[in-house]
Image (cartoon, helix red, strand yellow):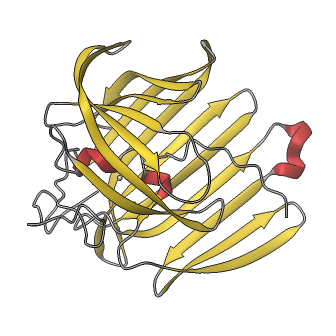
Amino acid sequence: MKRSYFILIIAVAILFSVSLSGCALFYDKEGNTWENTKIPWKDYEETKYKIINNGVSTGEMVYTIEKTSLNGTPAYQISDRLLLKEGEYYTGAVISPENLKPFTSFLINHPPKAQKQNEMEINGTYGEKFDINIKYSKGTEKVSKKLPPVYYDNETLLELPRAFPLKADYARRIRVCVLLTNKVEPFRLEVIGQEKVTVSAGVINCYKVKIGYIGLNKYANIYAWYSVDSNRTLVKYEQKQTKFELQSIKYQK
């Protein structure tokens, strides 16, 4: 099966603790234990971003974080809807508030009518293995991947740093399960400074975070800016010539 790799590896990109607002005690910079996390968002949050490619506005990204439960277990669903002329992409994951460990993830590709042959839906379930079910125009496919002891989900990647203890010189390695490619990839997150960022939502003081791939392939570095206040809002994202810039945020449906 031929699949296009739309790398905002992001997506994106998130988080949690012993209670919905508690925190663990330790973290391991090598990524061998779960991170020290603290939930920065409300029970509902929606952020909208302008997408810019090569200096031209090309669409909108909408992130939604919502408190939920899975089989009676407290959880958050983090999802993003990417609206482009080329179609609509909807991805997300359900994760634990205790340590950001993912339970399930999904990716849905709705291309324009002229490209319906590229329509695809992928669902992942985390357990003893990462079980992936793929539906596309010509059939279905099932894949299982072995999981490392500590792992996060790619569909929430850009939201993860919000719950980490960001500060000057902070750094950590993480392993990320990528639903689209059926792989577990290694990354290194590091705070590389503080900057004031000007976007439609205002002028915001931010931590600048580099998310660098440290595996065998070649992926461009991701740069993300998070507000230094207690909300740790994702304000801006850059990867190569693609940018997201915060337009608005709300905390109720």
Q: Nearer the viewer, residue 16 or 169?
A: 169
Residue 8 vs 197, above or below: the answer is below
Residue 77 vs 239, above or below: the answer is below
Q: Nearer the viewer, residue 27 or 100?
A: 27
Residue 236 vs 98, above or below: the answer is above
> Residue at point 19% right, 36% down?
231
Q: Nearer the viewer, residue 165 or 76?
A: 165
Q: Quadrant of residue 242?
A: top right
Q: Quadrant of the N terminus?
A: bottom right
Q: Quadrant of the C terminus?
A: top left
Residue 123 vs 38, above or below: the answer is below
> Residue at point 22% right, 37% down?
232
> In the rendered image, is residue 105 in sight?
yes
Q: How many marks?
A: 0
Q: Percent from the top left, x then y, of residue 210? A: 37, 38
Residue 180 vs residue 192: left or right?
right
| Outermost residue toward the bottom in this view | 128
Q: Percent from the top left, x then y, of residue 170? A: 20, 46
Q: Percent from the top left, x then y, of residue 248? A: 37, 22
> In the rendered image, is residue 13 in sight?
no
Residue 38 vs residue 79: left or right?
left
Q: Nearer the viewer, residue 137 or 230?
A: 230
Q: Percent from the top left, x then y, of residue 66? A: 34, 51
> Residue at point 34% right, 58% down?
173
Residue 212 vs residue 241: left or right?
left
